[in-house]
Image (spheres, rainbow, N blue to C red):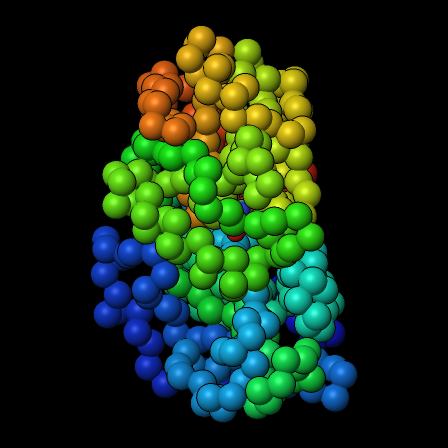
Amino acid sequence: MTTDTLAIKVTKATTSKLSTVDFDNLPFGKTFSDHMLTATYADGEWKDFEILPFGEIGLSPAISALHYGQAFFEGLKAYKHDDSKISVFRPDQNAKRFNKSAERLCMPELPTELFIQSIAALVDVDRAWVPSKKDYTLYIRPFMFATDPYLGVAPSTTYKFMVLLGPTGPYFSKNLRVKIETEYTRAAEGGFGYAKAAGNYAGSLLPAKKAAEQGFDQLIWTDAKTHEYVEEMGAANVMFVINGKLITPLTRDTILNGVTRGSILQLAKDAGIEVEERRVSVSEIVTAVDNGTCTDIFGAGTAATIAQVSELVHEGKTYTLPNPAESVFANTMRKTLDDIKYGRVEDVKGWNLMI
Ligand SMILES: *Cc1c(COP(=O)(O)O)cnc(C)c1O
């Protein structure tokens, strides 16, 4: 761990909550570790990096994050290897994206080193919280929000950077029934769909709720202008295997550039699989599912790694995919990624930050 350049004040919790946690029942996002990290941006600089017991934070009700949504987050995970070593997967990529989000929302950048060292220090303090059980992880949630107590619509001059940790169980690997959304939009050209901005998720709740009421597990977003091109699946990138080729929408300002997406593309290329990043039309997909050339559709993201689709519905018509359990591509890729993350194979790409 390299905290040499960053002085972090550490105040340990007097008692640990660890023994009260039921590790067999860990719904995502509800259990938090003993500590959290906070830092403050004021007078043009980041300062007061501090690890302290997890708990409530007192803030003015006028902070601009609450009124105008100057807030964004990241999501990554720590993994425990069989030899009890702990790694975090590609935090440099999240640091890069963190600063893209910051720039778009008129918020201050956080130097990559400070982002990574903050995460490394917090995970180290709470290393006992990284679950040992197979397929379990410690979820890491860095975020930044505006703290000026000012109701004018203007960029805040003060901010908080925080990191929370929570142990989480394996993603429920149900095969998904997915709707191609042709009414609502997640992101429009010129907007900030590529940022992990809090407001993007608020806007997705109603379409997701309606889709759930219609019996769907998830929806595939299409472009705002024509609804003819696929963009993402829920809060994950969407990927297709057609005629043995891996195809995914090219990232642009309406698409979040996922770390999982990038990792899968690289591993596929390494394995000699043809990869296409380009615009992908709805008609191409439904035709390929219909004629059996599309063997895989899946969402790619940190939460689920790979979430496979078994049924696709477009304008009321259902398209059924081959049995996801038998998919060679998705299952091999999931294993390849997990083998790297859990240290079961040599990390030849240097993707794991060892804590
Ligand atoms: C977080 C996120 C992803 C996946 O990114 P990863 O870095 O792979 O976790 C994709 N799309 C959206 C909209 C997201 O919020």
Q: Is residue 350 visible?
A: no
Q: Position of residue 347 (x, y in %)?
A: 61, 39
Please determine whether, in this image, residue 91 is positioned above or below residue 152. above
Residue in the foreground of this view, choosing between 191 and 143: 191
Please identify the quadrant where the N terminus is shown: bottom right
Say whether residue 192 is left or right of residue 287. Answer: right
Total marks shown come to 0
Please determine whether, in this image, residue 268 is positioned above or below residue 83. above
Please identify the quadrant where the C terminus is shown: bottom right
Q: Residue at x 28, y 56 (%)?
A: 26
Q: Position of residue 251 (x, y in %)?
A: 66, 40
Residue in the foreground of this view, choosing between 137 and 141: 141
Q: Position of residue 217 (x, y in %)?
A: 32, 40
The quarter of the picture where residue 295 lies is top left
The quarter of the picture where residue 110 lies is bottom right
Q: Residue furthest right?
A: 44
Q: Residue at x 43, y 57 (%)?
A: 138
Q: Residue at x 63, y 38 (%)?
A: 262
Please determine whether, in this image, residue 165 is positioned above or below residue 16. above
Q: Position of residue 25 (x, y in %)?
A: 23, 55
Please determine whether, in this image, residue 259 is positioned above or below residue 250. below
Q: Residue at x 52, y 49 (%)?
A: 186
Say whether residue 182 is left or right of residue 259. Answer: left
Q: Is residue 296 visible?
A: yes
Residue in the foreground of this view, choosing between 171 and 203: 203
